[in-house]
Structures are given as structure tokens and as C-alpha cells.
Image (cartoon, rainbow, N blue to C red):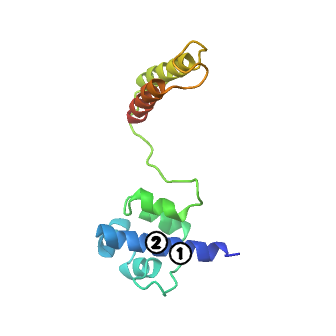
């Protein structure tokens, strides 16, 4: 069984491959994070054979905003992700959209709805659109 350090190193190598694929400069990551370039290169070495230096919690904080969050999330266990908290929420609008979603979902489970107690294709499309609107709010 592989230990957590080996898994972390593999994930850091994967981040480097994706940074290269997206053409994200390590110098830009260094500049944006305030972490010295040599340290960034040690976290994300160019060679697949090189063992990356493990990223500490302080560096993780500094990398937020310097790395795409989907890549930074690769450092977390499966099922976890880093997301940016929304600012300036209109809580009344969010509550309205949430109530609308719950109402539509409950209606979709009515025995006389499109697919009875199951959610039918049209109901699924309507509910998905409501989730998109909710997330956007």
C-alpha cells in the first residue's frame, strides 16, 4: 500500500503536467503566490523521476489564487475540493431559488407526476436548470 507522501508526490507531478499543458508559467505562480521560484520548482519539478518537496499548509494558502483551484484541489483527498466562497450574496434571492427548487422536486415525486414517484426526463431537466440558477446566485 502506498503511503500518503507518495500519493501527494504523484498528485504534485500531475499538477505540473497540467500546468505545462495549460501553459501556466511557474514564474507567474511564484510571483502570484509570493513563494520563491526555486521553491515552486521543488514542489512541481519538470522531471517525472524527481521527488517533489511536499507542500505545507502555509504554501497551500499562498497558492490559493496563484494556481487554478481545480489543480490545487488535486492535493486534497478524493471527494474534496477547494472552492472560492461567494461574496455579496443576495440571501433573499438564494432563499427564493432554493424554495423554488424544493417545491419543484417535491412535485416531481408526486405519484401523478411525469414518472410517478421517480423523476422523469422533463422533470430532471427542470430541476437541473433550477440548480444551475441556484449555483449562479
Any mark on residue 77, and which? none
Q: Is residue 10 above or below residue 127?
A: below
Q: Is residue 22 above or below residue 93?
A: below
Callout 1: 10 Å neighbours few (<14), some, many (20+)?
some
Residue at the spot x=55%, y=21% of the render? 115
Residue at the spot x=33%, y=70% of the render? 21
- Which residue is disc 1 drawn over? 10
- Tell me the element at label 1: helix
Q: Is residue 85 above or below residue 133?
A: below
Q: Position of residue 69 (x, y in %)?
A: 42, 57
Looking at the image, residue 80 sits to the left or right of residue 61; the answer is: right
* Residue 87 can be seen, yes or no: yes
- Which residue is disc 2 drawn over? 14
Q: Residue furthest front?
A: 115
Asked whether disc 2 touches disc 1, contact meaning CB atoms under 8 Å apart, the reply is yes
Looking at the image, residue 118 sits to the left or right of residue 15; the answer is: right
* Residue 55 can be seen, yes or no: no
Marks counted in the figure total 2
Q: Is residue 126 above or below residue 40?
A: above
Determine the CA span between mark 2 and mark 1.
Answer: 6 Å
Q: Position of residue 9 (x, y in %)?
A: 54, 76
Question: 54 or 76: nearer the eye?
Answer: 76
Q: Quadrant of the C terminus?
A: top left
- Could you say which quadrant of the image residue 87 lies in? top left
Question: 41 or 46: nearer the eye?
Answer: 46
Callout 2: 10 Å neighbours few (<14), some, many (20+)?
some
Residue at the spot x=46%, y=83% of the render? 48
Question: 54 or 130: nearer the eye?
Answer: 130
Amino acid at each position: 500500500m502506498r503511503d500518503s507522501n507518495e500519493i501527494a508526490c504523484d498528485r504534485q507531478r500531475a499538477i505540473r503536467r497540467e500546468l505545462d499543458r495549460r501553459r501556466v508559467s511557474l514564474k507567474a505562480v511564484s510571483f502570484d503566490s509570493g513563494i520563491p521560484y526555486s521553491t515552486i520548482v521543488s514542489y512541481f519539478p519538470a522531471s517525472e523521476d524527481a521527488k517533489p518537496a511536499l507542500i505545507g499548509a502555509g504554501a497551500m494558502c499562498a497558492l490559493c489564487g496563484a494556481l487554478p483551484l481545480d489543480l490545487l484541489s488535486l492535493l486534497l483527498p478524493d471527494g474534496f475540493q477547494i472552492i472560492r466562497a461567494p461574496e455579496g450574496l443576495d440571501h433573499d434571492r438564494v432563499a427564493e431559488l432554493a424554495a423554488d427548487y424544493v417545491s419543484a422536486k417535491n412535485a416531481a415525486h408526486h405519484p401523478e407526476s411525469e414518472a410517478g414517484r421517480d423523476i422523469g426526463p422533463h422533470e430532471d431537466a427542470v430541476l437541473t436548470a433550477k440548480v444551475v440558477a441556484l449555483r449562479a446566485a
